[in-house]
Image (tube, helix red, strand yellow):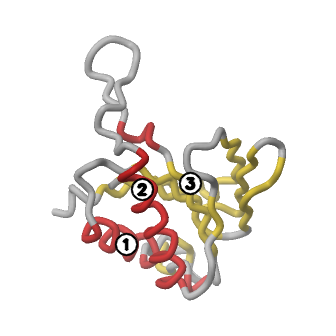
Amino acid sequence: MIAVIQRVNGASVTIEGTVKGQIGVGFLVLLGITASDSSEDLEWLGRKIVQMRIFGDAEGKMNLNLKSVDGNILLISQFTLHASTKKGNRPSFIEAARPEIAIPLYEQMIEFLSSELGKPIQTGEFGADMKVNLTNDGPVTIIVDSKNRA
């Protein structure tokens, strides 16, 4: 399971002209799921996201997490994070989980992040054509892979 975490001043996702999810200060999280991902991957990654200390403290050092700044999360499923570009110029998405595996894990991640953060999170819609708008703060973008914990 891969998460691309972007520290934002604001972010939104629009589907068919309607805003589905919107946040102010917080994280836009793009989530990629593979068939080999488990609940253990989900919990490890979910905790990592909520506890990630990438907001500036009074001295400007990255020392604060989402809870410290009353931040929010906009979670977007994105199978293209698992693109293989080794051969040719057309990416292969063979590593990305099929919907019957990915949807339940995505929904579990929504619940887990909401529970860990202590409030509802905003989301896109799995499999939809989404237009994501964000103001990246910094910019700060962190990639976390549950298969690379060492």
Q: Which residue is mark 1?
A: 48
Q: Are marks 1 and 2 in contact (CB under 8 Å)?
A: yes
Q: CA distance from mark 2 to mark 3?
A: 10 Å
Q: Position of residue 23 (x, y in %)?
A: 72, 66
Question: Looking at the image, is mark 3 or mark 1 earlier in the sequence?
Answer: 1
Q: Say the numbered circle drawn on residue 94.
A: none
Q: Quadrant location of the C terminus? A: bottom left
| Residue type, label 2 | Ala
Please, what secondary structure does the residue beneath circle 3 have?
strand
Q: Residue 28, located in which quarter of the rendered image?
A: bottom right
Type of amino acid under label 3: Ile
Q: Nearer the viewer, mark 3 or mark 1?
A: 3
Circle 1 SS class: helix
User: How far apart are labels 1 and 2 at the CA level?
Assistant: 10 Å
Q: Residues within 10 Å of mark 3 (few under 14, many from 20)?
A: many
- Three-letter code, disc 1: Lys
Q: How many marks?
A: 3
On screen, residue 113 above or below 128:
below
Label 2, residues with CA under 10 Å away: few <14, some 14-19, many ≥20: many
Residue 140 appears at what percent x and percent y? 53, 56
What residue occupies the far left of the structure in this picture? 150
Q: Which residue is mark 2?
A: 3
10 Å crowding of disc 1: few (<14), some (14-19), many (20+):
some
SS for callout 2: strand
Look at 55% across and 85% down and name the residue there.
Answer: 67
Q: How far from the left and from the top, in percent, is residue 95?
A: 29, 38
Name the mark on residue 76.
Answer: 3
Residue at coordinates 33% horizontally, 74% vertically from top-left?
43
